[in-house]
């Protein structure tokens, strides 16, 4: 089955381009504004949208995304509303792939079968769950593939030769290469090592490899898109939204415009 | 091993995937998976190494003061007018609680693995103090993550950790308690995997931690077994322990799981009552979910967001519980019950007055359950309560609860 994710990467490849993958947090700064930002992203240059599912205990996220998730939860965001957001997005956009990304517990509590059914109906193309390594594939990865939803896997600098085949097995859509042993929002440093790791992964899979974690500037986007099939930007976008809010989280600037300017700027370097 | 492990045993878990029935497992970011595999391998090899075993036994004896005493609480038993109550005196261990048992085992493991930096989370500070202690003993830098609320209510332990040379990192996220400290410790670990050993203090977290912590704490139950046979010539009728994450409890319970004549009671923090949100009774009032690397009973809402519980005892203030306990609950081998804040405070006061032993507020929960049950039992019955820690650290909390200006 050819998915939206497969189609976009194939089209980019034909044009000799790389994918700009943008992460936003569902319900941040609030549901309506978040949806408006999501709708604007493809025009600004996003090829794939990662939609974060807020979770109370995000162990792989730095302060920026932690705060955004907490704000979203306080605003009443739930997994059900996140799925609804994808559904609303799909009313005017049938092309841009949407990957929902988060932690397992909200999905587990929602019910895996119910989640996959509702996500598929809403137009979700892929899922990325930070705390489901290959050892736990029976939980969600296998059922997701059976439901026709791609299960995006994370590979990291600790994914060595021995582990690589285990990580690549059952993966679909693309590989999310985490640039560092760290959490979101840290500083990118080791471009040479990243290039080597991406090359090693690409030697073992036909799937596209995108690099994420620590990519905030146009210069970093240029460097990373030279060595991978796509770049993922998350914290920088969340920070752009946060910069338009006051200390209480009230919108005082224009978050939609702030994200648009940032993504256009970064996209020009892809 | 005093008991053979067979196919019909309750003591065979976890399986190769780290599961106790549907609970447990390895729900962690990919970055950590190779480390957990390495840890499991290192632990498996260490268990077969007599040098490792000898080193741990020597430290347990000469440094920690094991075996801890099994004390017949005569005046308490007479006061309650029923079963004969024995106290397993883990409060007499070096550092003042059972936490040292696990820390000695894991620091030896860290050294074997060539790790040069120790991190840990702590709630009441008992585990933090034990980690800081063994880090000092072996000359390793130690960072302890602790919630700001816990820092406030466990000041003596914070100072002890500082004196021992550890860095206490305050965490204000969430409610500033154990759950939030554990999140931050996991983030630290992901960032510093190459040189860092995460010394988890409770029988929870991703596989193989629940197994490792249980094994190192099982010394409690093994000793009780031997000691009560010497004293009473038979096994106890009931054993009771408090359960936060559940390390002292599983340590006491595990060697008795196949003794089906022994009733086993785990006591959760009932806080201000299960009809409020102010409790930490994950098993009694929670539902299965996935947090901190394992599937277990959790306090959570219908969207799978973890709730912040409450207990007067910082060590029980955790919205989850070790996965083996969740399994033991579901198969009905162990009974789990809540004890309210005020019941624990009364038991704290009672033991202090009639036995001259100041128990930790965590252990006071187990005592409070014994206070309820012993009077209904005949005088020939034997109950063992795990006195997991001493209460010096809690005198400020108790004072405040009694309206004193501390």
Image (spheres, coloured by chain):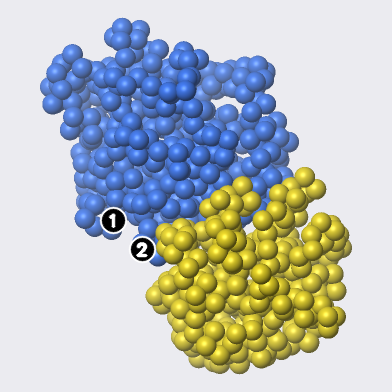
Q: Can residue A185 be seen in this view?
A: yes
> Which numbered disc covers residue B278?
1
**Which residue is located at x 53 percent, y 18 percent?**
B61
**Which residue is located at x 65 percent, y 64 percent?**
A152
Q: Do labels 2 and 1 share a chain?
A: yes
Please state if B116 lies on the left or on the right of B364 as rendered: right
Q: Vertical placement of B281 versus B114: above or below?
A: below
Please tell me in which quadrant of the rendered image residue A232 appears. Answer: bottom right
Closer-to-camera residue (B239/A172): A172
Q: Vertical placement of B197 versus A243: above or below?
A: above
CA distance separating discs 2 and 1 = 17 Å
- Residue B321 is situated, as x and y percent measured from the top left of the image, at 41, 44
- Residue A161 is situated, as x and y percent measured from the top left of the image, at 80, 48
Chain shaded yellow: A
Q: Vertical placement of B385 versus A15: above or below?
A: above
Q: Drawn colour of chain B?
A: blue
- Residue A254 is situated, as x and y percent measured from the top left of the image, at 56, 92
Local SS, label 1: loop
First in sequence, mark 2 or 1: give its number.
1
Local SS, label 2: loop
Q: Which chain carries label 1?
A: B
Which marked residue is nearer to the observer: mark 2 or mark 1?
2
**Which residue is located at x 33 percent, y 45 percent?**
B283
Residue neighbourhood size for the residue with mark 2, other residues' Cα within 10 Å, grouped as few (<14), some (14–19), many (≥20): few
Q: Mark 2 lies on which chain?
A: B
Please state if B343 lies on the left or on the right of B3 as rendered: left
The answer to the question of whether label 2 and label 1 lie on touching residues, with beta carbons closer than 8 A, is: no
Q: Vertical placement of A188 versus B48: above or below?
A: below
- Residue A185 is situated, as x and y percent measured from the top left of the image, at 65, 68
- The residue under label 2 is B302
């Amino acid at each position: 089955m050819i998915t939206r994710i497969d189609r976009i990467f194939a089209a980019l490849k034909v044009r000799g381009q790389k994918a700009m993958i943008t992460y936003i947090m569902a319900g941040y700064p609030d549901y309506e504004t978040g949806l408006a930002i999501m709708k604007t992203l493809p025009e600004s240059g996003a090829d794939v949208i990662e939609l974060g599912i807020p979770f109370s205990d995000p162990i792989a996220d730095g302060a920026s995304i932690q705060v955004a998730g907490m704000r979203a939860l306080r605003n009443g965001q739930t997994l059900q509303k996140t799925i609804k957001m994808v559904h609303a997005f799909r009313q005017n956009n049938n092309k841009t792939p949407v990957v929902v990304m988060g932690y397992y517990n909200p999905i587990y509590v929602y019910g895996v079968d119910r989640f996959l059914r509702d996500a598929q109906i809403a137009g979700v193309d892929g899922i990325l769950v930070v705390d489901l390594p290959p050892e736990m594939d029976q939980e969600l990865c296998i059922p997701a593939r059976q439901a026709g939803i791609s299960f995006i896997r994370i590979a990291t600098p600790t994914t060595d030769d021995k582990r690589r085949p285990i990580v690549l097995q059952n993966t679909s859509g693309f590989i999310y290469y985490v640039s560092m042993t760290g959490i979101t929002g840290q500083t990118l440093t080791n471009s040479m090592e990243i290039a080597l790791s991406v090359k090693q992964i690409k030697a073992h899979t036909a799937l596209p490899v995108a690099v994420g974690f620590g990519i905030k500037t146009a210069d970093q986007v240029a460097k990373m898109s030279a060595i991978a099939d796509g770049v993922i930007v998350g914290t920088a976008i969340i920070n752009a939204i946060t910069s338009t809010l006051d200390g209480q989280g009230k919108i005082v600037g224009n978050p939609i415009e702030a994200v648009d300017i940032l993504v256009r700027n970064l996209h020009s370097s892809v | 091993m005093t008991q053979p492990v067979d196919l019909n045993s309750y003591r065979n878990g976890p399986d190769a995937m780290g599961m106790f029935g549907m609970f447990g497992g390895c729900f962690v970011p990919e970055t950590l998976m190779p480390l957990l595999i390495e840890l499991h391998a290192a632990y498996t090899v260490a268990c077969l190494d007599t040098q490792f075993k000898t080193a741990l036994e020597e430290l347990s004896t000469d440094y920690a003061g094991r075996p801890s005493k099994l004390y017949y609480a005569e005046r308490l038993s007479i006061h309650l007018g029923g079963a004969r109550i024995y106290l397993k005196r883990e409060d007499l261990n070096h550092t003042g609680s059972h936490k040292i048992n696990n820390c000695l085992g894991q620091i030896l493991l860290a050294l074997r693995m060539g790790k040069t930096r120790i991190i840990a989370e702590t709630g009441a500070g008992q585990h933090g103090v034990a980690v800081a202690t063994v880090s000092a003993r072996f000359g390793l830098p130690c960072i302890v993550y602790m919630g700001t609320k816990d820092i406030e209510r466990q000041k003596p332990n914070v100072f002890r950790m500082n004196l021992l040379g550890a860095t206490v990192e305050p965490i204000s996220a969430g409610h500033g308690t154990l759950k939030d400290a554990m999140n931050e410790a996991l983030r630290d670990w992901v960032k510093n995997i190459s040189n860092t050993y995460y010394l988890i203090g409770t029988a929870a977290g991703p596989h193989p931690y629940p197994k490792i912590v249980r094994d190192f704490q099982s010394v409690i139950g093994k000793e009780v077994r031997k000691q009560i046979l010497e004293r009473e010539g038979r096994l106890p009728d009931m054993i009771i322990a408090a359960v936060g994450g559940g390390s002292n409890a599983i340590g006491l319970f595990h060697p008795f799981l196949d003794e089906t004549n022994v009733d086993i009671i785990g006591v959760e923090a009932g806080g201000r009552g299960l009809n409020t949100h102010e409790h930490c009774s994950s098993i009694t009032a929670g539902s299965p979910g996935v947090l901190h690397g394992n599937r277990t009973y959790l306090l959570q809402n219908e969207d799978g967001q973890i709730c912040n519980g409450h207990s007067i005892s910082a060590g029980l203030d955790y919205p989850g519980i070790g996965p083996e306990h969740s399994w033991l609950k579901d198969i009905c081998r162990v009974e789990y019950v809540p004890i309210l804040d005020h019941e624990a405070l009364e038991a704290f006061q009672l033991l202090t007055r009639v036995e001259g032993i100041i128990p930790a507020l965590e252990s006071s929960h187990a005592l409070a359950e014994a206070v309820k049950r012993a009077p209904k039992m005949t005088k020939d019955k034997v109950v063992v309560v795990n006195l997991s820690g001493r209460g010096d650290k809690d005198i400020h909390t108790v004072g405040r609860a009694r309206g004193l200006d501390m």
